[in-house]
Image (cartoon, rainbow, N blue to C red):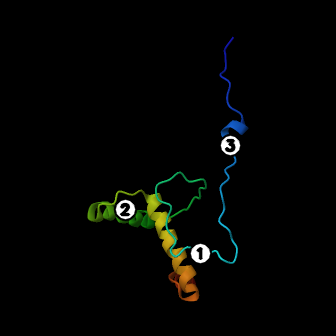
Amino acid sequence: MTRRPSLPGASELFRLTTGDRPDDGPGSQPPAQRRGTGRQKHSTKITVYVSDEELLALEHARLALRGEHGLAVDRGRVVREAIAIVLDDLEGHGEDSLLVRRLREQ
C-alpha cells in the first residue's frame, strides 16, 4: 500500500491579507510622485504581449541600465517604473499627457 503525503488545504495555502488603509477623508493628499514598487513580492500578475522589436528594445534598455548606469534590474522592474512614470504624467497633465497624445495618434 502506497502512502500519500497529506497536502495542505486551501485555507493553509491562501490567507487573507489585511492592512491599514490610509484615510480617504478630505485631509488625505495623493502622493506627490508615483513610484514603481521595486524589489518586493507582488500579489497581482498581468500578462502583456509585446512584439519581438518591443522585447528587444526592453532588453537593450535593461542592458544599458546595467552597463552604462550600474543598475542591475529585471524587465519587470523596468516595466513597473515605466508604468509609474506614465501614470504620474497622466495624473499631472491629463489631456496634455504623453499617454493621451500617443493613444490619440493611433
Question: At 55% across and 75% down in the image, what residue appears?
Answer: 87
What is the spatial separation of the Cα atoms under label 1 and label 3, in whole angstroms? 31 Å
Q: Mark 1 = which residue? A: 30
Label 2 crowd (10 A; few <14 / some 14-19 / many >=20): some
In this rendering, is residue 9 above or below 57? above
What amino acid is at disc 2? Arg
Find numbered disc 3 in the image and state the secondary structure of the residue it sits on: loop
- Snapshot quadrant of residue 5: top right
Q: Mark 2 = which residue? A: 62
Disc marking residue 14: 3
Check the image and name the residue furthest to the front: 27
2 or 3: tag closer to the N-terminus = 3
Between tags 2 and 3, which lies in front? 3
Check the image and name the residue furthest to the left: 68
Find numbered disc 1 in the image and state the secondary structure of the residue it sits on: loop
Check the image and name the residue furthest to the top: 1
